Amino acid sequence: MTLLLTAILLIALSLACGAVWRSRRQAATFKALLKLSPNGLLLLDRQQRIVWHNPAAARLLGQPRQHLPGHLPLAHWLPSLRSLPAPMERIELVLAAEDGPRQQDLTRLSDINGQTVILLHPETDLQSSTEAMERFKRSQYFAQIGTWDWHIGTDQLYWSEAIYGMFGYKPGEITPSYSLFCNSVHPDDREHVLEGELRCIETGENHDEEYRVIWPDGSVHWVRETGNVVKNEQGEPVRMMGIVRDITNEKRSANELRKLAHRDPLTGLPNRLMLEQQLGAAIPRARTQDQRLALVFIDLNRFKSINDQYGHATGDSVLMEVAKRLRSAVRNSDMVARLGGDEFVVLFEGLPRSNAVEAEAQRISEQLFTALTPPMLLQEGEFHIGASLGVAVFPDHAVTMDKLIHAADLAMYAAKRSGNNQYRLGDDLHTQAQLLQSTKH
């Protein structure tokens, strides 16, 4: 290895300085040694593009004619290489070969005059141990990462063993093909996956897509696929090679976090954050479409006495029943949210400007009262609750989100002061503020 490192240093210096080699015979002898070496040697520029290589490097990277066409980055040949290792560090990579994936070890040697020196270890070092190859296959399986190789324009597709499970099959159960792959991709994702592959073939850009696959049992799973093209000596793309990783659990965790951030954990309804996001988008939409929207604040009456007398478990059952009734009483396009405690909000969009505001508010309130008034027959018994509604309409009562929320809130307090199952409009904030103050003294 010491002799080999010395040789690498000499060739790097010769490429950088040019004047080091005084003897043509000496240079020819050294180049012959590099040509016969079973180790792959590469020099990379600052963009990690290959500026020189020996024949063994081309062979190890899948080019039997011992020449790597073009001035391409190393990641083009090794898509699984995310970043270069530290100097003198050896790493294991996956190389998709025609006869199946194999492990390709790579060591970064010390940089020479701004150029990166890479050593590719010959496959004889890696395949001499059956145990090592079995460990490699198992690591792919447990890491849920597999390698693929597609001959462009044909149905010929190679999968490593780990990929079968990502598509719902056992290794060897089916013969991988490009048509099978396309049919497995979710119909809603198929177009952008194929567009990404075409863009990679036409431009040489890395292919990196997240998409869903449908298993034979009908279940839906997520994968992330990365890869690039392999070109022939004429510079024509002939194959695509890369890796695919199962990201179903990652997507599921992300969805759970998103749900926790935007949903009430008891009822599953949107929380205040999600309501404000929806309302913030609904107001400009209503303005553009010359429509109204109504924001209804709902406070439950007699809920506190039920909660105190029967306990929090019964109170939770009442809240879940209220959420269910409100959701059933409105359109799919309307939003029902829970702010906390016994306060709910309903956002009605797409209301016509032709109806009188008072008539629209009365219709909405009667619709909600009809849903909430019937007795609740729960496991704990029969319960009756009432509600106080505050209705604020855009643009009649307010034209901004904050003012609309304030108007609906004040109107709800005014309704609560007036008795059970009452509603009030947010058309006079001064009057509503006076009523609110009177309820506090």
Image (cartoon, rainbow, N blue to C red):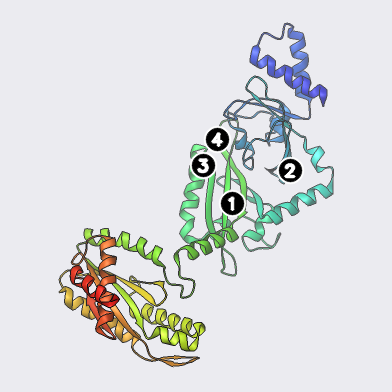
Residue name at image x 17 percent, y 78 percent: 359
Instruction: Please give left or right for residue 165 compared with residue 228 in the image.
Output: right
The disc at residue 200 is 3
Q: What residue type is labelled 2?
A: Gln
Q: Give residue 168's position: percent from left, percent from top.
A: 63, 63
Query: Disc 2 on helix, strand or loop?
Result: strand
Q: Disc 1 or disc 2, which is closer to the eye?
A: 2
Query: What residue does disc 2 label?
Result: 103
Q: Which amino acid does label 4 sit on?
A: Glu
Residue name at image x 61 percent, y 51 percent: 244
Q: Give residue 79's position: percent from left, percent from top.
A: 62, 41
| Pointers 1 and 2 in contact (C-beta within 8 Å) | no
The disc at residue 409 is none
Query: What residue does disc 4 label?
Result: 236
Q: Disc 1 or disc 3, which is closer to the eye?
A: 3
Disc 3 or 4, which lies upstream in sequence? 3
Query: What residue does disc 1 label?
Result: 155
Query: Which residue appears farthest toward the top when viewing the image?
Result: 22
